[in-house]
Image (cartoon, rainbow, N blue to C red):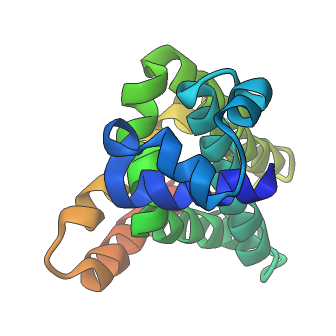
Amino acid sequence: MVKLIQVAWKHFTEYGYAESSMEEIVAEAELTRGALYHHFGSKKGLFQAVLESVQTEISERVEAEAARSDDALEQLILGSRAFVAAAVEPRIRRILLIDGPAVLGWEAWRRMDEENSMRHLREQLELMQRQGCLKPVPLDALTHFVSGALNESALWIAQSPDADQSLEETISVISHFLKAFAH
């Protein structure tokens, strides 16, 4: 089913969820429509599996980037940069930030986000508090605030005429913000 998810990812990126044809996806993946429904139940189920793959890829990129530093604050900044950089890529942006909430519904999309990106973000913030390098602020509020800022920044950058400059500006703002909470 890996090939089906890869083909569907390509189609959902190029055409969006609504315009993606299940017939074209299964034909390109060299499978039957029955196989798709057997494994995923529906087009929406296939889309959710693609979104899970997107989130896994982003998590791996964030973790790899954060691992470049031993400093918890720098890890958070590097991870935030990796998240935003990944989220603005066309092959990720539409699935993660545009079609994801629309197709799955806000509540389901939020649950997936909380189980993935926000969970990792909260773990890093908790680590920073335990190490004494983050002021004692309410972690739920901070996690939601930072997550929302990163998601909104990705949407803004994606529409910017100079995405590279907007990414640098965003990371600068996020760095200053996060440093304000550091000890």
Q: Is residue 92 above or below residue 22?
A: below
In front: 132, or 94?
A: 94
Locate residue 133 relative to residue 177 in the image: left or right.
Answer: right
- Residue furthest left as drawn: 161
5 with respect to 105 (left or right): right
Residue at 42%, 58% (x, y): give it.
13
Which residue sits at x=28%, y=65%? 158
The quarter holding residue 80 reads bottom right
Residue drawn at x 49%, y 51% as measured from the top left: 24
Q: Nearer the viewer, residue 101 or 69?
A: 101
Pick the front one: 94 or 29: 29
**Count of numbered badges drawn on the protein:** 0
Q: Residue furthest top?
A: 107
Q: Is residue 79 above or below residue 35?
A: below
Is 111 rendered above or below residue 5?
A: above
Q: From the image, which quarter does the C terminus lie in? A: bottom right
Q: Position of residue 166 (x, y in %)?
A: 26, 75
Q: Residue at x 79, y 43 (%)?
A: 123
Residue 108 drawn at (x, y percent): 56, 19
Pinpoint residue 65: horizontal percent, then vertical percent.
Answer: 71, 76
Eyeballing the image, is 100 above or below 59? Answer: above
Image coords of residue 150 (percent x, y): 44, 52
Which one is in front, 166 or 36?
Answer: 36
- Note whether residue 150 is visible: no
Q: Is residue 93 visible?
A: yes
